[in-house]
Amino acid sequence: MGNLIYLRPLVPEDAKISYQWRNDPRIWEFTEFKPTSIITEEIETKWLEAKLKKANDQRFAICLSDTNQYIGNIQIIDIESNKGEFHLFIGEKQFWRKGIGMNAAKLILQYGFFDMKLEMIFLFVHKNNTAALSIYDKLGFITVHKRHNQFKMVLTKSMYLLENKFSEDRMTDNEAIS
């Protein structure tokens, strides 16, 4: 992986950048949740502050290791009963298709399964989002349900361990999540 990226907790100040992503239709092309009006920095800040107060969400910024540039978000939300919902997006389009999504997903899955002690992580993905589907397939997620244009995919800790040939002893990757 080469530590090209690291994850850090999202903070309200990240809204100064993320509000711009929320107004870019290309970023939301494959999601069910699209903004219906222009998102201002103030709207984004209030939204982010509310989300960061949720005890059952773990939200992180994806940052480049060499410059600390904030380029996307990754999270596990609605955590309960040892399971949570995974979300990922790269907001800075110049970093699309560079392997960053895969690297970030590996970091958050390791964190979710080993630090948070989750037993299952699931996600929803648009059937035409080939970049995301490629990542999720390589990580071992399996499709368990199809509805309209969305697939629900699941990865359990045991599947993850088998797919990635990890042991339960957490690999330390120079504390990639700070």
Image (cartoon, rainbow, N blue to C red):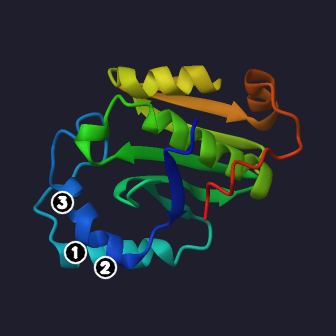
Front tag of 3 and 1: 3
Looking at marks 3 and 1 on the same chain, the residue that comes earlier in the sequence is marked by: 3
Residue 116 vs 107, above or below: the answer is: below
Q: Residue 19 appears in which quarter of the rendering?
A: bottom left
Amino acid of disc 2: Lys
How far apart marks 3 and 1 lie (CA) works out to 11 Å
Amino acid of disc 3: Gln
* Residue at 74% in and 31% down: 160
Residue count near mark 1 (Cα–Cα under 10 Å), binned few <14, some 14–19, many ≥20 = few
Please report contact status of discs 1 and 2: CB closer than 8 Å, yes or no.
Answer: yes
Please report contact status of discs 3 and 1: CB closer than 8 Å, yes or no.
Answer: no
Q: Which residue is mark 1?
A: 43
The x, y position of residue 110, in whole percent, is 70, 45
Looking at marks 3 and 2 on the same chain, the residue that comes earlier in the sequence is marked by: 3
Q: Residue furthest left?
A: 38
- Whether residue 167 is visible, yes or no, is yes
* Residue at 11% in and 60% down: 37
Residue count near mark 2 (Cα–Cα under 10 Å), binned few <14, some 14–19, many ≥20 = few
User: In this rendering, would 32 be left or right of 66?
Assistant: left
- Whether residue 28 is visible, yes or no, is no
Please report contact status of discs 3 and 2: CB closer than 8 Å, yes or no.
Answer: no
How far apart marks 3 and 2 lie (CA) works out to 15 Å
How far apart marks 1 and 2 lie (CA) works out to 5 Å
Q: Residue 2 appears in which quarter of the rendering?
A: top right
User: In this rendering, would 43 be left or right of 70?
Assistant: left
Q: Which residue is mark 2?
A: 46
Q: Helix, strand or loop at disc 3?
A: helix
The x, y position of residue 85, in whole percent, is 57, 48
* Residue at 65% in and 23% down: 140
Q: Which residue is mark 3?
A: 20
